[in-house]
Image (cartoon, coloured by chain):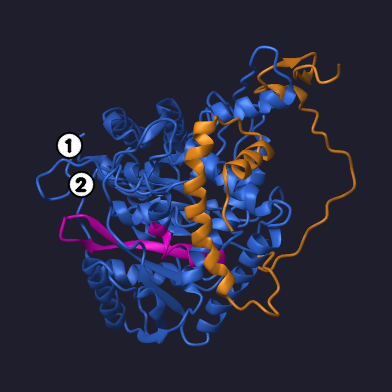
Chain colours: A blue, B orange
Amino acid sequence: MSDLTQLGVAAIRDGVASGAFKATAVAEAFNANVAAASLLNAFIVTTPDNALEAAAKADADRAAGKSLGKLAGVPLGIKDLFATRGVQTTAASHILEGFVPQYESSVSQKLWDAGAGMLGKLNMDQFAMGSSNETSYFGNVISPWKRNDGGNAALAPGGSSGGSAAAVAARLCPGATGTDTGGSIRQPAAFTGITGIKPTYGRCSRWGIVAFASSLDQAGPMARDVRDCAIMLEAMAGFDAKDATSLDVAVPAWEAGLNPDMKGKRVGIPREYRMDGMDADVAKSWEDGIAWLRDAGAEIVEISLPHTKYALPAYYIIAPAEASSNLARYDGVRYGLRDLPDGAGLQDMYAATRAAGFGPEVKRRILIGTYVLSAGFYDAYYTQAQKVRALIARDFEAAWAHCDIILAPTAPSAAFALGDKSADPLAMYLNDVFAVPASLAGLPAMSVPAGLNREGLPLGLQLVGKAFDEQGVLNAGLAIEARAGFSAKPERWW
Amino acid sequence: MSVDTATVARIATLARIRMSEAEIAALVPELNNILGWVEQLGEVDVSGVEPMTAVIPNTLRLRDDKVTDGKIRDKVLANAPAAEHGFFGVPKVIE
């Protein structure tokens, strides 16, 4: 039999449904790849029995002539930010080590309801704070990609959904869940040559997802191509009464609506994203993307998003502020770690628990958030940032008068080496410069592979759409995918 | 605006994170670097702009005014580091 782990979500779903192969064979093949890839450190926990059980049910349902779910027989990886009933969920932190949820996140439940199985919980940046997967308590995720210089530098898979990205790129799973607060789906997708989409804020329920910055957090799929993302997103999205910010709107049939014809569509190229000293290969891939969309029938227009340079500083006030509030719940009382020094009182226990349980980047962000929200500074920092955020959203609103979709690079560079930026928090933050504006405006945005740079590493192109227009984003992504012909994959060394 | 060791120590106390003097000293330049960088937001003209409160227009839903404690006490306590007699256990707080 051919190698089933080379198949994506659509091919597995169709093959299981037609009887070309058994779902259990698919689950076994991926379980074997997961077990053989411990060097990548992409998983914190593996759940091979869970994958096999869901697959056996899909096979039995088919044999019994029952109708199959949209993801029947598809094994998936789940970012460790999603609470999974009976399976440890840590957000890659020490403070939640050993936490076994008694409930299932709404998004993962929807995937299981559609017939998918779980291969395991994917490593990530601790509490989703990071762009390189170097802040996990459980060690760095190593990208499966290597530079073509003959060197052996370990590269960052991006972050925070770095385990998801590495696992999909290395064929450890056909698709995975990610979450995106300021680029955490798109940047790792770009770094590893895969596809990932963050939907409109509110499309996917946040219930049961460990909270980082609640006004920004959105779940989304990461997979090998646009169609696979459309299939997964259809299963993940939908109204949930348990999330106060969930959108009560119908989930469109995104897969059925896929259409790479861009005739009559206007693609905006934001001039503020053309920064001085832009990486030549990134600039070239952007030009390629423009040519591909023009070839697909689109009209290319230059647009202006004047407040772009303020997006990142606004984000680094708003996200830490929300994080400092959200992470106040880790107190050593209700769940997770407790550090109770001899003779300590309640306040000492809180402080000792949080000192022992949070990593340096998490502490840094909690302190920044605490500072900008503290008496006397709230207006100067937080209120000002929320006003700038309104202006950034307004920039996009104004741009939609001239275009239907925006094309830009996903990240300013290809993957960097582990350790390259970890000593300088600011340099790390700047990696999300192109991803953050769409997050602040709550807009759907996707990264698709565009090609390889001179070092043989993947580059991604980003498409940003109007609120609720995931279809437009997916379709433009499909037009690029069809022309980029990206087929490179990492050579197996692990 | 910039922070000094006393300010960082005060923020750490507010955030309930125990920190050594060495940790605080290391954080002072890091936080100042970040705060100096976000300071550029001050140059944006925001007159007449309301701070954003919701990225996507949405309405707040109301639920029925009913007690819904879920009757799942054991599940709520299942991950508590020191559950006792059906409650969360904490160190003594009343002398």
Residue B19 placed where, x, y %? 57, 31
Q: Residues within 10 Å of mark 2 (few under 14, many from 20)?
A: some
Question: Is residue A304 rendered to the left or right of residue B35?
Answer: left
Q: CA distance from mark 2 to mark 1?
A: 9 Å
Taking the spot 64% from the left edge, 65% from the top edge, the residue there is A386
Q: Chain of mark 1?
A: A
Question: Is residue A368 rendered to the left or right of residue A407?
Answer: right
Residue assigned mark 1? A493
Whether residues under marks 2 and 1 lie with C-beta atoms below 8 angstroms apart, the answer is yes
Residue A122 placed where, x, y %? 42, 37
Q: Quadrant of the C terminus of chain A?
A: top left
Q: Are marks 2 and 1 on the same chain?
A: yes
Q: Which residues are magenta?
A: A430-459
Label 1: element kind = loop
> Which numbered circle lies on residue B32?
none
Q: Is residue B33 above or below residue A44?
A: below
Q: Is residue A188 above or below residue A2?
A: below
> Which numbered circle lies on residue A490?
2
User: Can I make out residue A199 in this image?
Assistant: no
Residue A289 placed where, x, y %? 29, 74
Label 2: element kind = loop
Say which quarter of the image contains residue A303: bottom left
Taking the spot 9% from the left edge, 45% from the top edge, the residue there is A150
Marks counted in the figure total: 2
Taking the spot 38% from the left edge, 74% from the top edge, the residue there is A273
User: Can I make out residue A6 in this image?
Assistant: yes
Answer whether residue A85 is magenta in the image.
no
Question: Is residue A242 rendered to the left or right of residue A278?
Answer: right
Q: Which residue is at the front of the view, B92 or A186?
A: B92
Q: Chain of mark 2?
A: A
Q: Residues within 10 Å of mark 1 (few under 14, many from 20)?
A: few
